[in-house]
Image: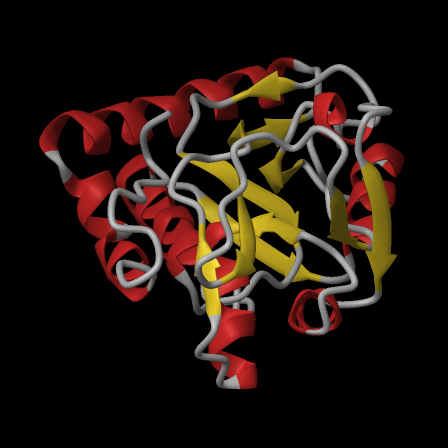
Amino acid sequence: MALELGTFKIPRYVRSQSQGEFLDLVKRIGEEEDINIKVRVMPPKRVISFFKGGTFDGYFPALDMLNPMEVHKSSVFYYKKDFLFSLKGKTIKSLKNKKLCLTEGYPYEPKLISRNDITFYYASSDESCLEMVIRSRVDGFVCEGLTGVAAINKLKLKNIQAHEKAISSMPVYFAFKKNEKGKQMAKKFTRIIERMRKNGDLSKLFEPAKNSVKYYLKSYDPTNN
């Protein structure tokens, strides 16, 4: 059976149409379920538009807040956990009355961005947010753990810390059209994901990612909530 999926570039996880942990997972599912899967990488808004318009059978990584319509879902294979990054040594016990930088176009949990007791500033990139933290223009920067650490490393910063407790955690899955094919694909993807979760292969798949942020987030595990 043929299947066409859309996705978008994500540091480490989707580096190209064939490279990255998310693509490794897709490849394994295709092999074990005998599905001929074609993946196309494009900007997030185009992926959602193509999925809604019927070009794609499904897309990933999917979040409830991104879905343009009702979908069939696979089981969760990843949790998008956002963390607070601040100047090293800064104690932040509560986000109330704080000034936080967010990255434009990034899918933040609605409960966070709807808070009226936080002043939000938006920047065009993770790096720009970190520069605002360095200059003390904001108290902190909220970002997914892996991408936040990647931005720190890119700027070669030594005076930034990550706060261990996640600000939010959103389940990530494969989304498929609300039709019979989509229903069957969701079942097939779920079968392999759950098998990998049970035998430890899902955790092993993301082990390098966990190790890459261990200096900042010792207990980081994107496969468990």
Q: How many marks?
A: 0
Image side of residue 101 versus residue 170, left or right: right
Res 2 seen here = yes
Image side of residue 165 versus residue 98, left or right: left
Q: Quadrant of residue 65?
A: top right
On screen, 9 above or below 159? above
Q: How is the image coloured?
A: secondary structure
- Give the camera-side residue of 80 and 40: 80
On screen, 113 above or below 133? above
Res 13 seen here = no
- Give the camera-side residue of 84 and 137: 137
Q: Residue at x 44, y 59 (%)?
A: 89
The quarter of the picture where the C terminus appears is: top left
Residue 5 location in percent, x, y? 62, 46
Q: Residue furthest left?
A: 199
Residue 126 location in percent, x, y? 68, 65
Residue 15 location in percent, x, y? 52, 70
On screen, 202 above or below 180? below
- Give the camera-side residue of 170 and 119: 119
Image side of residue 173 versus residue 68, left or right: left
Q: Residue at x 49, y 85 (%)?
A: 156
Residue 131 location in percent, x, y? 70, 74
Q: Residue at x 71, y 37 (%)?
A: 108
Q: Quadrant of residue 148?
A: bottom right
